[in-house]
Amino acid sequence: MTTTNAPIDWPRIDTVFLDMDGTLLDLHFDNHFWLEHVPRRYGEARGLSFEAARAELHARYRDIAGTLDWYCVDHWSRELGLDILLLKREVEHLIAVHPHVPDFLEALAALGKRRVLVTNAHQKTLALKLERTPLAGHLERVVSAHDLGIAKESPAFWPAFQAIEPFDPERSLFVDDNLDVLRTARAYGFRRLLAVLAPDSRQPPRQTDEFPAISDFSALLPGLAAAAQSTVSGA
């Protein structure tokens, strides 16, 4: 629950861009879905053992990891002959917001920061998760990479995003659990980047020295509270 470097200078930030899966939401849902639930249903449909189905799917996942197709519900429905959205609804009870996220988002609002969700999730998955959580009420805008036809891992993503959501990379914070995505944002010119070390609550936290990082958003609440108090004192 600690940051790996100096506190964030909140007065110098106008906009906070936030990933969804693994950042605001617990990645346990997605990991369970793709690594357990889909192989089980795929095996049942094809007459394969769970182990054989999982081995086949893992290889297919690896082939397109980091591309927009990897995140695409329609792609996997076509490729696997399964209704992926229906399968997601079978385990939708596992969709959960990470601890302290609502408090963090409300603290940003109190400071007048623009809160923008930037996700690789397909629009159908995004709709399901916004239906199951209160996130939408805490955000000024929600953008799926599928709206742009470019995954966040691609160097072309941020120039295309800038065209629909103008922002100053020098005065923006971007939070994500995917290090490849953070590297792309850094190359685009983001000055402030933050990695999430515990995207899946059922897995031990990861480590990175490459980016400032937090285990959860409680680490940012004292700094936001201090910034709010400073704003009040200076009014």
Image: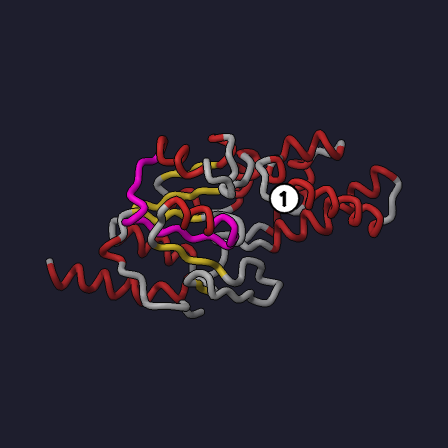
In which quadrant is the C terminus drawn? bottom left
Q: Position of residue 128 (x, y in %)?
A: 55, 39
Does the magenta segment cover residue 166? yes
Res 211 visible: yes
The residue sitting at 44% across, 42% down in the picture is: 118
Vertical placement of 103 versus 78: above or below? below
Vertical placement of 198 versus 61: above or below? below
Residue at numbered disc 1? 65
Vertical placement of 135 versus 98: above or below? above
Does the magenta segment cover residue 213? no
Horizontal side of 90 relative to 172 (left or right) equals right
Q: Position of residue 53 (x, y in %)?
A: 81, 46
Residue lying at the far left in this picture: please name it. Answer: 235
Q: Which residues are magenta?
A: 165-181
The residue sitting at 58% across, 43% down in the picture is: 66
Horizontal side of 151 relative to 163 (left or right) equals right
Mark 1, secondary structure of its residue: loop
Depth check: 33 or 58 in front? 58
Res 130 visible: no
Would you call the spot at circle 1 few (<14 residues within 10 Å), some (14-19), or many (20 or more)?
few
The residue sitting at 38% across, 43% down in the picture is: 116
Amino acid carrying label 1: it is Ala
Depth check: 112 or 90 in front? 112
Q: Position of residue 62 (x, y in %)?
A: 68, 46
Q: Position of residue 191 (x, y in %)?
A: 33, 53
Residue lying at the far front in this picture: please name it. Answer: 187
In which quadrant is the N terminus drawn? bottom left
